[in-house]
Amino acid sequence: MTDDDRLTRLIAMLDDLDADVDETIDLADEITASGDTGLLPRLEDALGRTIADRNAYGRELLGGVIAGLGGTDRLPVLVRASAVDLGDDQDGLAAEIVDLVQADPKTAGRLLRPLTEDDDLTVANRAEWALRFAP
């Protein structure tokens, strides 16, 4: 199975309420381990769809894959995704954001400071929150 096929399968599994959770997580881990950054645009589109569908589980899972493949450069995408209230605790996504900020504080600051001035106050507040974790 190609990485593209894995991603197609993962997206389908996120829409299937009967999908096996362990299999879904394993597939997400395989995609992350592939290192295939060419998948990031599709992953980010899928993340947007899961948020629109109010799928907190999908947001957490895809956020982790995006963080794993894209690293600190994807912080703006992850912070914007995190700013949407889906009624969950966001422990996984928050941990991914904190890890990325701490791994590369200089890049994180460069990418997140402009978001602190975002017209969407939730995004601005979430960016400020993330920046608190920079050493």
Image (cartoon, grey):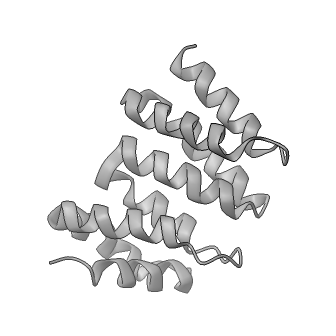
The image quarter containing residue 12 is: top right
Q: Position of residue 57 (x, y in %)?
A: 67, 59
How many discs appear?
0
Q: Position of residue 9 (x, y in %)?
A: 69, 28
Q: Nearer the viewer, residue 90 or 114?
A: 90
Res 77 visible: yes
Position of residue 43 relative to residue 103, above or below, is above
Q: Nearer the viewer, residue 74 or 56?
A: 56
Name the quarter where the C terminus is drawn.
Answer: bottom left
- Residue farthest top in this picture: 1
Position of residue 79 relative to residue 62, above or below, is below
> As drawn, is 128 to the left or to the right of 88?
left
Residue at horizontal 44%, vertical 28%?
38
The image quarter containing residue 27 is: top right
> As drawn, is 126 to the left or to the right of 101?
right
Residue at horizontal 35%, vertical 77%?
130
Q: Position of residue 78 (x, y in %)?
A: 47, 61
> As drawn, is 118 to the left or to the right of 55?
left
Residue at horizontal 40%, vertical 51%?
67
Name the quarter where the N terminus is drawn.
Answer: top right
Res 36 visible: no
Q: Position of residue 70 (x, y in %)?
A: 36, 44
Residue at horizontal 48%, vertical 39%?
29
> As drawn, is 74 to the left or to the right of 135?
right
